[in-house]
Image (tube, coloured by chain):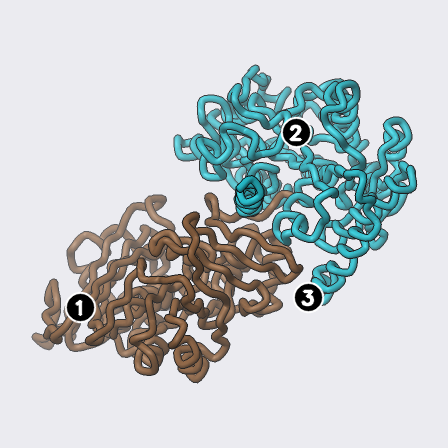
Chain colours: A brown, B cyan
C-alpha cells in the first residue's frame, strides 16, 4: 500500500517465476513496483522510506572519507556470499582501511534483461542483512535495466562515506623501513571459493569466501594502537602480492616477508596447487594488511588476535630500505625469491 | 597436503644441497639444462639456485609449449578466429602470446572474434555440443602430456558424430627438441654452450616413459635424469646428474619412480598413434625448423583437422630481430643478456616467446631472478671496489 492507502500496482510482482524486463528500468509503474517490492523491502530504513531521489544526512565534525566501487563478480553466487554481500563488505572495507567509521552507503544496480526476480530479491535481501549486521545503512540507490547481452546478470556499484577518527592520518606513502607487516588471517579463501563455482572449472571444496566487513576489527586496532598504524589495505584482486607491491612503490621502500609465516589453509593451498595458481595472487574479501611502526607491532597484533576477524593474524615480515621497491620472500624451501605483480589474469597452467 | 609438503621439506633440501656441495668437483663446472618450463618454474619459485654451489649452473631450456609456438601459427589462429562462423577454444595462457604487429588472441577477442578460454579439451567439446551452429575449433598445443587428452576429445567427437568440432594441432615432441639442441652448431661444433646433462620432464615421461631418451644419452653421451616438478625432485635430480658426470656415465636415470616407467603409458601412446602422425618438419619459435618435432592429424581424420577444413595457411612471420629468444632457449644466452629484457619486453608487454608464459625462461627470470641479478652485480661492484 502506498501513502494514500490505495493499491498502487495492478498485478503482484511474480518474484518466484518472473524475470526483469526492460519496463522495470523504464521509469514507469513497473520500475516503481520493482524498487518498492524488492529493494525498499530488503534494505528498509527511514531514508529509503522517505522516497526521495537523494538522501539527506547530518555530517559529523572532523575529516570525512568517501569511496566508490563496482562489483562484476562471476558467478554471482558463491560459497560464503554473493555479489550483494560483496558490494556491502567491499565498500565498508575501503572506508575502514582509512581507519574510518563507515556511516552510509549507496547502491546502483545495472540489471540485464531476463534476470530472474528471485535472484534479484535474494541479492537485495543479502545486502539488507549485511547492512543491518554491519550497522551501515544503504540510504540511496538507482536501478537501470539493459538489454539482454549487455551485462552479465547484474552489476552493482556502491559508494560509501565515513568519518576518520581525530588524530588518524593513514597514507599509502607512509611505510618506513623497519615497519612490521601484519596480515589479519588466511589468504586466498575468496578467490578459491569463487573459482570453485566458475563455469568449466567447478571442483568440490569446503572453502567458503572470507567476505566480511572489517570496520569492527579496524576500530579495535585503532583503539589499541592507532598512532602506530602507518597504513592499511585490503588485499582484494591481485592478492597480497599486488597489495605489498603497491605499498612498496607508493612508499618507496621494499618488503621482506616469510612464506612460512603467511597463514594459508591447506585446502586453499591444495586448490592453488591443482590449478597452478600462486595463493599470493589470489583475491581476498575479508582480510587486511597493516603496516605498523615497530614499537606498536605487538599491541596492534594482540588487538587483532583478540577480535574474531583477526584471530589468525600474523606478523609476516618487515619493510626494508630498497630503491628497487622489491617485495622479497624467504621461501619455505630455504631459498629466496621476488614476489611480483601479477601480469594479466592469473590462469591455470597448461601442463 | 602431506603428499605435497613432503616434497618441499626445507631441511631435506639443505641435506641434498650439502651432498651436492660435497660431491661436485671444485675444479670443474657443471651445466645442466632443465628442459621443461615446469622445472624452470620450480627452480625460480623455490629459489633453488640459492642452494647450489657456484660451479653448478642451471640452463633454462625450451620446454614451454606456449613459448615455442611460432608467431605464424598465432597469426593463423587469429585469422581463423576472425571468421564469423568459428568459435576458437584456447587455453588461457595462449591469449597473450604475441603474433605479428603486436596482435594477440586477447586483442582479436576484443575486436569481435569468438574466442573462449577453456580449461580442458572436454570444455571445447561441450561447447561444440551445446552450439551446433558454431564451428568449434580447439587450439591444441603442448608436449606429450597434453596430446592424449586431445586424442580422447577427437575420439569422443567422432563417437558423438559432432560435425562442428575440429582441432588446430600444434602438439610438439620433447626428444626431437633435445636432439635439435644437441645437434645445433653452437653446442656440437663450436662448443660455445656447455651442456653436461639434462633434467627430463616427468609428466612427459609418464606418457612416453624413459626409453625415448636412451638414444641420445648414448649418441651424444649426455646423462639424463627424468625428474618430477616438486623442488625436492629437482634438487635430487641435480645431485644424480653431478654423480653421473663425476663417474663419466651418460645414462638415463629415473628420479620420478613414483609415476614413470621405462615404456610409459602404452594405452595413451596407442590413442595418440591412432589419431596423429609425425610432421616431417615443424617450426619451433626460437629453434627454427625441427625435423619430426611435431604431430598432425592422420589423413583419415581430415574433417577434424582445422588446417585442412579451413584451408589455413601459416604466414611467414619473423620475431623482433633484437629478440634473443632463440639463443636463450638453446642456453647460449641468459635472459638478462637480451637488450629487450626488462626494457620493452616484460611479462605485461612480451616481445619474445620466453617472456610470454609464466614458465618461459625470461618470465621466470623477470619474476624471480631479477633480485639475484642485482645481488650479483652488487657483489661484483664490491669486489671491484
Residue in the foreground of this view, choosing between A120 and B336: B336
Q: In the image, residue A28 lies at what x, y percent?
A: 15, 56
Pinpoint the chain carrying mark 2: B
* A78 to the left or right of A89: right
Total labels: the figure holds 3
Q: In the image, residue B344 lies at what x, y percent?
A: 44, 31
Q: Label 1's element?
A: strand
Residue in the foreground of this view, choosing between B121 and A89: A89
Q: In the image, residue A108 lies at what x, y percent?
A: 24, 59
Q: Quadrant of residue A230?
A: bottom left
The residue labelled by disc 2 is B170
Check the picture and name the quadrant holding the C terminus of chain A.
top right
In the picture, the disc for residue B331 is none
Task: Farthest residue to the front: give it.
Answer: B385
Q: Label 2's element?
A: strand
The residue labelled by disc 1 is A64
Q: In the image, residue B264 lies at what x, y percent?
A: 85, 43
Same chain for labels 2 and 1? Say yes or no. Answer: no
Pinpoint the chain carrying mark 1: A
What residue is drawn where x is 16% and y is 55%? A27
Q: Residues within 10 Å of mark 1 (few under 14, many from 20)?
A: some
Q: Is residue B7 visible?
A: yes
- Sequence order check: which comes first, mark 2 or mark 3? 3
The residue labelled by disc 3 is B1
Q: Is residue B277 visible?
A: no
Q: Quadrant of residue A30?
A: bottom left
B64 in relation to B69, above or below? below
Between disc 2 and disc 3, the foreground one is 3
Check the picture and name the quadrant holding the N terminus of chain A.
bottom left
What residue is drawn where x is 51% and y is 62%? A257
Amino acid at each position: 500500500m502506498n501513502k494514500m492507502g490505495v493499491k498502487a500496482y495492478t498485478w503482484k510482482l511474480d518474484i518466484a517465476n518472473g524475470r526483469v524486463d526492460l519496463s522495470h528500468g523504464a521509469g514507469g509503474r513497473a520500475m516503481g513496483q520493482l524498487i518498492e517490492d524488492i529493494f525498499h523491502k530488503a534494505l528498509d530504513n527511514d531514508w529509503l522510506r522517505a522516497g526521495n531521489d537523494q538522501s539527506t544526512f547530518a555530517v559529523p565534525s572532523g575529516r570525512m572519507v568517501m569511496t566508490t566501487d563496482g562489483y562484476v563478480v562471476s558467478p554471482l553466487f558463491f560459497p560464503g556470499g554473493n555479489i550483494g554481500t560483496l558490494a556491502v563488505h567491499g565498500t565498508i572495507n575501503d572506508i575502514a582501511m582509512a581507519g574510518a567509521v563507515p556511516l552510509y552507503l549507496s547502491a546502483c544496480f545495472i540489471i540485464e534483461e531476463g534476470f530472474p526476480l528471485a535472484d534479484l530479491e535474494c541479492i537485495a535481501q543479502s545486502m539488507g542483512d549485511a547492512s543491518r549486521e554491519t550497522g551501515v545503512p544503504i540510504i540511496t540507490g538507482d536501478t537501470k535495466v539493459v538489454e539482454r547481452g549487455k551485462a552479465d546478470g547484474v552489476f552493482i556499484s556502491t559508494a560509501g562515506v565515513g568519518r576518520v577518527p581525530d588524530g588518524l592520518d593513514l597514507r599509502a606513502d607512509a611505510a618506513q623501513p623497519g615497519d612490521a607487516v601484519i596480515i589479519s588471517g588466511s589468504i586466498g579463501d575468496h578467490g578459491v571459493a569463487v573459482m570453485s563455482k566458475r563455469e568449466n572449472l567447478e571442483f568440490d571444496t569446503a572453502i567458503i569466501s572470507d567476505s566480511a566487513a572489517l570496520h569492527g576489527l579496524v576500530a579495535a586496532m585503532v583503539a589499541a594502537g592507532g598512532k602506530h598504524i602507518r597504513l592499511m589495505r585490503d588485499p582484494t584482486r591481485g592478492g597480497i602480492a599486488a597489495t605489498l607491491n603497491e605499498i612498496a612503490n607508493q612508499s618507496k621502500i621494499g618488503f621482506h616477508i616469510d612464506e612460512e609465516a603467511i597463514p594459508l589453509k591447506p585446502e586453499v593451498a591444495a586448490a592453488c596447487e591443482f590449478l597452478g595458481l600462486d595463493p599470493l595472487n589470489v583475491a581476498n574479501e575479508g582480510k587486511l594488511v597493516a603496516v605498523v611502526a615497530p614499537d606498536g607491532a605487538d599491541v596492534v597484533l594482540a588487538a587483532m588476535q583478540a577480535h574474531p576477524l583477526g584471530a589468525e593474524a600474523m606478523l609476516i615480515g618487515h619493510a626494508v630500505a630498497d630503491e628497487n621497491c622489491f617485495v622479497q620472500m624467504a621461501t619455505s624451501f630455504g631459498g629466496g625469491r621476488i614476489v611480483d605483480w601479477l601480469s594479466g589474469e592469473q590462469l591455470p597452467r597448461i601442463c | 597436503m602431506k603428499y605435497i609438503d613432503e616434497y618441499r621439506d626445507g631441511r631435506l633440501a639443505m641435506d641434498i644441497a650439502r651432498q651436492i656441495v660435497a660431491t661436485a668437483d671444485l675444479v670443474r663446472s657443471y651445466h645442466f639444462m632443465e628442459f621443461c618450463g615446469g622445472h624452470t618454474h620450480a627452480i625460480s619459485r623455490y629459489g633453488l639456485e640459492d642452494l647450489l654451489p657456484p660451479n653448478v649452473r642451471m640452463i633454462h631450456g625450451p620446454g614451454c609449449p606456449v613459448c615455442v609456438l611460432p608467431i605464424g601459427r598465432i597469426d593463423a589462429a587469429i585469422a581463423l578466429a576472425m571468421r564469423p562462423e568459428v568459435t576458437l577454444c584456447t587455453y588461457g595462457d595462449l591469449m597473450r602470446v604475441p603474433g605479428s604487429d603486436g596482435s594477440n588472441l586477447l586483442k582479436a577477442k576484443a575486436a569481435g572474434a569468438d574466442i573462449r578460454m577453456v580449461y580442458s579439451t572436454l570444455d571445447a567439446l561441450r561447447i561444440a555440443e551445446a552450439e551446433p551452429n558454431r564451428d568449434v575449433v580447439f587450439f591444441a598445443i603442448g608436449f606429450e602430456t597434453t596430446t592424449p587428452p586431445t586424442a580422447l576429445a577427437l575420439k569422443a567427437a567422432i563417437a558423438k558424430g559432432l560435425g562442428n568440432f575440429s582441432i588446430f594441432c600444434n602438439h610438439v615432441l620433447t626428444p626431437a627438441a633435445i636432439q635439435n639442441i644437441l645437434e645445433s652448431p653452437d653446442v656440437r661444433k663450436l662448443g660455445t654452450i656447455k651442456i653436461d646433462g639434462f633434467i627430463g620432464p616427468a609428466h612427459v615421461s609418464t606418457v612416453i616413459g624413459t626409453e625415448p631418451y636412451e638414444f641420445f644419452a648414448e649418441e651424444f653421451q649426455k646423462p639424463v635424469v627424468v625428474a618430477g616438478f616438486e623442488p625436492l625432485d629437482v634438487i635430487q635430480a641435480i645431485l644424480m646428474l653431478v654423480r653421473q658426470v663425476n663417474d663419466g656415465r651418460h645414462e638415463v636415470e629415473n628420479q620420478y619412480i613414483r609415476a614413470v616407467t621405462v615404456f610409459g603409458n602404452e594405452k595413451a601412446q596407442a590413442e595418440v598413434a591412432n589419431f596423429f602422425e609425425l610432421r616431417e618438419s615443424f617450426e619451433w619459435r626460437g629453434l627454427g625448423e625441427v625435423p619430426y618435432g611435431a604431430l598432425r592429424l592422420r589423413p583419415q581424420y581430415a574433417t577434424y583437422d582445422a588446417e585442412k577444413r579451413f584451408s589455413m595457411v601459416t604466414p611467414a612471420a619473423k620475431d623482433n630481430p633484437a629478440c634473443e629468444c632463440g639463443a636463450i632457449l638453446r642456453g647460449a644466452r641468459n635472459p638478462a643478456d637480451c637488450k629487450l629484457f626488462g626494457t620493452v619486453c616484460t611479462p605485461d608487454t612480451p616481445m619474445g616467446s620466453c617472456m610470454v608464459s609464466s614458465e618461459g625462461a625470461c618470465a621466470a627470470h623477470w619474476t624471480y631472478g631479477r633480485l639475484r641479478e642485482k645481488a650479483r652485480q652488487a657483489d661484483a661492484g664490491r669486489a671491484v671496489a
